Image (tube, rainbow, N blue to C red):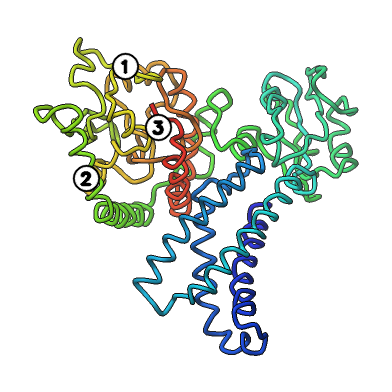
Amino acid sequence: MPLILLAVVETLILVASVYFARVVAFGNFELAEQSLSSVAPKALTLATVMLLALIATGLYQFHRRVYFHEIFVRVLVGFFLGSIVLGAAYYAIPSVGLDPKIAFLAVATALVLLSLTRLVFSRVVDENIFRRRTVIFGAGQRSKVVTKLRRRADRRGFHLVGTVPAPGDEMREDQTGVCHNVDCLLQYAIDHKADEIVVAMDDRRGNLPIRALLDARLRGIEVIDLVDFMERETGKIRLDLVNPGWLIFAPGFRITRLRRLNKRLLDVAVASAALILTWPVMLLVALAIKIGDGPSLPVLYKQRRVGLNGRVFDVLKFRSMRPDAEKEGTAQWAVENDPRVTRIGNVLRKYRLDELPQIFNVLAGQMSIVGPRPERPEFVDQLSAEIPYYAERHTVKPGVTGWAQLRYAYGASAEDAKEKLQYDLYYVKNHSLPLDLMIMLQTVEVILWGKGAR
């Protein structure tokens, strides 16, 4: 809700800045008021492009705490990117363009107002007015995952008003509340104006207070399972909380024919556009590899990866490591400051330029633009044996970018793979066209700031 409100406010600011710029440029409100209807499409075009640019620079991530100077830098970068796109659009379609003087004034005005808006938002977002008031039912081991969310940014979506122990539980020192048994659960929630009750019992068999929870729902208090609560607040599915029954009956995890079709159409459209835009860059990268590593060494390399439904395919990448990186024939995880990476490879990996040839994997239907990262068969066999539900990530096509890549650093161990799997399962459960578009936009931030590169 806060992000939706922020998007509405910023859109209004961007549109209003265009009209304000017209008044300043004309120096007369009556003259500026003439033909305002013809300006509306241009103002909406500017607002849409700038809003998408702000999303791409990571300014619409609710559970991230950033300082104002970082916000201002990201707003500047967003406006710079948006201005480039607008310039290209205005050059291609002059009818949607604004007078350069008006456009400059509008962007300058919006930059000041949006920076002030962001300053206010960064202060207000941590106030309780935007948070759901939450009561935890259960004081055992499972409920600890909520109390471990200690960072202010992690609790932006909820305000914990108390904990009610289930039968057999004892209140811990890190829990609050004065209700010590299930009989007062409903009244406790009502007295504290709770918006939701999170069921976090260690053992529900014979202990679930059906009547109290049903009465709470009928009074407008949402009742939510702990797994669903943590999924909503953290953007991942906690492996330590789920069981096969939840995976079977939880909403999501559906791949319809329509979904397959719109995902494939999006893949082909984006990959084709990316190929048209980036082929000069790919030529320069190939030339840099040849010059830096020697003309006799290959520019590309193929590596076996596991794709949809466990099928193995060859992923294409620009070579960023020495040819003898695995001379012993054993698959190795990439590590930070990996000595096998070449000088050119460091730059390619930092800005994800080594991934560009995967456009051809997408066009061939082996990969998608968005999805879990494809892993090597040797690692898949190991991780499937060690991590429950690891195979479920192969029920969708692997992607060039994905939810886990946005939310977690580069994976270089079995423990990292387990953490990333929790984000991959979230994507498998919730994947949709809007989520794919959002992930593609936010991937720009990863490229610009070189996040997670190794």
- Number of numbered discs present? 3
**Horizontal side of residue 180 vs 248, given as left or right:** right
Of mark 3 and mark 2, the one earlier in the sequence is 2
Quadrant assignment, res 127:
top right
- The residue depicted at 38 percent of the width and 41 percent of the height is 401
Nearer to the camera, 299 or 172: 299
The residue carrying mark 3 is 392
Which callout, 3 or 1, points at the residue further toward the start of the chain? Answer: 1
Helix, strand, or loop for circle 1? loop
In this picture, residue 348 sits left or right of residue 120: left
Q: Earlier in the sequence, mark 1 or mark 2?
A: 1
Specify few, some or many for label 3: CA neighbours under 10 Å numbering under 14, 14-19, or 20 or more: some
Taking 205 as reference, is 83 left or right? left
Mark 1 residue type:
Pro
Which mark is drawn over residue 283?
A: none
Crowd rating for badge 2 (residues with CA inside 10 Å; few <14, some 14–19, many 20+): some
Q: Quadrant of the C terminus?
A: top left
CA distance separating discs 3 and 1: 33 Å
Judging by the rendered image, the residue that carries numbered circle 1 is 339
Pointer 2: what residue?
A: 360
Q: Is residue 356 above or below residue 50?
A: above
